[in-house]
Image (tube, helix red, strand yellow):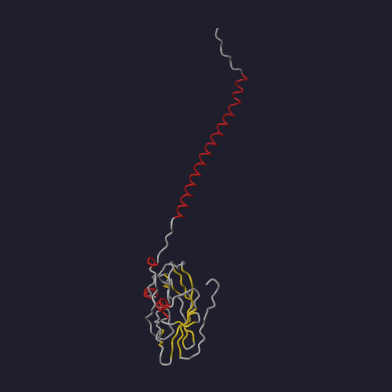
Amino acid sequence: MSRKPAKKTSADRQARAAALPEQARRAERRRRTLIALAVSVVVLAIVAAITFALVRTSDEPTSSPTPAETGIPTAPMKTASRRTTDPPWSAPSDPSARVRAAGLPMLCEEGNVEHIHAHLDVLVDGKPVAVPANIGIDQPAQQISPLHTHDANGVIHIESPVKATFSLGQFMTEWDVALTKDAIGGLKAGGGNEFRACVNGKEYAGNPAAIEFRSHDEIALVYGPAGQKTDVPSSYDWQEGE
């Protein structure tokens, strides 16, 4: 004789009903755990990809502009010709044209790869001749030469986007004042007058236009009667940060 299945008692039904919420909570916890694991895997993959890209980028050689690409010559000009008048010499009316004459480019901003300063004194008959502000700066065009002045204090700023050498000849060409071994502007040696150049207090032999700027050089161009005693500065009182 076959047995009939036992009828579910009220207690069984209550037990099963009571177990359902706990099963649901367990299922929800498993679902959340799986989602968290999936999110963690995705985040780790993204971080790994970014790290790999950064490392690869840092390993690649960075390219910086060359002097040729910026228009800055690898060797500066060592002559300066143009205005052959007596001082004072104002800043030129067309600074961009004079910068081009010096073989230099006009930049949209000051460079910071080569950033040094030098100082220029011009002494005529024992008296200083002003070196004007804004040599090499075209204010209407908002452009600037890597070789320029900001103030009328003789400080020459060399601020280039590439490593390069710059000369006094380039600067004097920008200033539009002729400079040779025997003359500055219209002042020529001879007839009882002499012209000489000094760098850091030491006399420079040859055409001073060939003098190359070094950081904190003190350059003096001196014209006057032969034998006249002139105090030639050997240094400049640089401000902090210059």
Instruction: In this rendered view, identify the residue nearer to me: 229 or 71.
Output: 229
> How far from the left and from the top, in percent, is residue 133?
46, 77
Instruction: Kindly give the residue lying farthest to the front in the view shown.
Output: 205
Count of marks overlaid on the render: 0
Q: Residue at x 55, y 34 (%)?
A: 30
Instruction: Kindly give the residue lying farthest to the top in the view shown.
Output: 1
Instruction: Kindly give the residue lying farthest to the right in the view shown.
Output: 11
Q: In the rendered image, which quarter is residue 33 located in?
A: top right
Instruction: In this rendered view, identify the residue nearer to me: 237 or 8.
Output: 237
Instruction: In this rendered view, identify the residue nearer to me: 173 or 143.
Output: 173
Q: Residue at x 57, y 29 (%)?
A: 23
Q: In the rendered image, which quarter is residue 72 located in?
A: bottom left
Q: From the image, which quarter does the N terminus lie in?
A: top right
Going by the image, does 30 lie left or right of 69? right
> How far from the left and from the top, in percent, is residue 204?
45, 82
Rendered position, 60 above or below 70:
above
> How far from the left and from the top, in percent, is residue 37?
53, 39
Q: In the rendered image, which quarter is residue 188 located in?
A: bottom left
Going by the image, does 19 lie left or right of 123? right
> How far from the left and from the top, in percent, is residue 29?
56, 34
Q: Residue at x 50, y 87 (%)?
A: 230
